[in-house]
Amino acid sequence: MIRFDDALALVAEAAKPLGTEPASLAEAHGRVLAAPVTAAVSAPPFDASAMDGYAVRDADLAELPARLKVAGEAFAGASPGMTLPPGRCMRVFTGAPVPAGADRVVMQEDVVRDGAVAIFAGPPGTARHIRRAKSDFAAGDVLLDAGRLIDARAVVAAAGADVAALGVYRRPRVIILGTGDELAEPGSARVIPGAIPESVSYGIAALAREWGAEVVARRRLKDELEAMEAEAARALDEADLVVVTGGASVGERDFAKAMFAPSGLDLIFDKVAIKPGKPVWLGRAQGRLVMGLPGNPTSVLVTARLLLAPLLACLTGRAPGEALLWDKLPLAAGLVACGPRGTFVRARRAGGQAEPLANQDSSAQRALAEADLLIRRRRGAPAAEAGELVEVIDF
């Protein structure tokens, strides 16, 4: 049994990006850039109006009120290259090219129109309302660095740079195998004596997608070793990562590791000194990564958040630390001393504090839904009083 930090280091060492591929802008959201994004155009490509109004020369507003004949109009999308004659003004709209010779755009609210003449009664102020060419970025500028998670803002920047496709890391294909004779599909357990709804594979699938995985399949397995071995071999053939839930203890029918033995399972670590989630393990079989998670709902989600999320981060081209951004919050209530295993206490944010939940049972599901924080308690830590700062992570 190893410490949590040692397990995390082994996760980072084992999980490497799976290669790259192009993705269109429409498909890129949630992916990780494998190559920087370089602007193909400048923005703005020309001096552009930041307001609906009138382009003028400062010299023509030296004496007020000024009456200037309107020389024409420029709308967004018009070709640049127009020139403003002295003693004239030009009607321009937001995004339109500002004619050469103009020093500013006066907002339309500050101008009175009299037929073909625009009347400027008062001083225009300090704002020029012109977006200068290349003031945002120039063609050839690097806008997004490799390793950047592509969010909505990154998509806008890439599209604005006239880039249609991005080089991204490939999504890991994940198969989730839930083990246990007692499990039944949600919606059917109520009519099967002795059955309980199989819930954890749905949660693991959701978490895996949140961290960039492509969930190929979720399969529920009976505790029958020969059939499980066949399903393990099948999953290894189809996925980059296989996640097994349950069957990781020492019972007579706990076959989570045994099912991979014919495929040459090589364990990277087996059991981690954390609570909940001690039975978590990681290995390789047939060149694929296999992670074993506990079967209890809270245990499986806690260990998945702490170890599966960093694993997926690494596989998708991110740093493992991006999955574990620790913060500190004051405790809303005291905590008892921590034992020989590091403990992750389920909690919720309340008034800027971390409030531990009353129910810390590893099988709790209602409390799991209420938790949005994990409080990290290092092994051997003394009792903590209300108000004391503790390490927390979003859950």
Image (cartoon, rainbow, N blue to C red):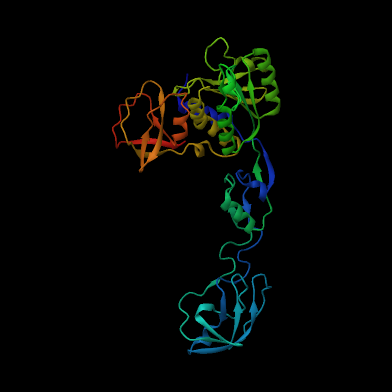
Q: What is the x, y in percent for residue 285?
A: 64, 21
Position of residue 216 in the picture relative to residue 305 (left or right): right
Position of residue 323 in the picture relative to residue 236 (left or right): left
Q: Quadrant of residue 52?
A: bottom right
Instruction: Tell me if I can see residue 144 in this picture.
Output: no
Q: Quadrant of residue 31?
A: top right
Reply above or below: 2 against 368. Answer: above
Reply above or below: 191 against 135. Answer: above
Q: Residue drawn 43% across and 24% down?
A: 361
Q: Quadrant of residue 21?
A: top right
From this viewpoint, which residue is outermost toward the top?
Answer: 252
Total number of numbered discs in the rendering: 0
Position of residue 13 in the picture relative to residue 163 (left or right): left
Which of these two is toward me, 52 or 321? 52
From this viewpoint, which residue is outermost toward the front?
Answer: 191
Q: Residue drawn 68% across and 15% down?
A: 227
Reply above or below: 24 against 227. Answer: below
Q: What is the x, y in percent for residue 16?
A: 60, 33
Instruction: Tell me if I can see residue 44 in this picture.
Output: yes
Q: What is the x, y in percent for residue 70?
A: 61, 85
Q: What is the x, y in percent for residue 279?
A: 50, 20
Which of these two is toward me, 74 or 139? 74
Q: Residue drawn 64% across and 76% down?
A: 74
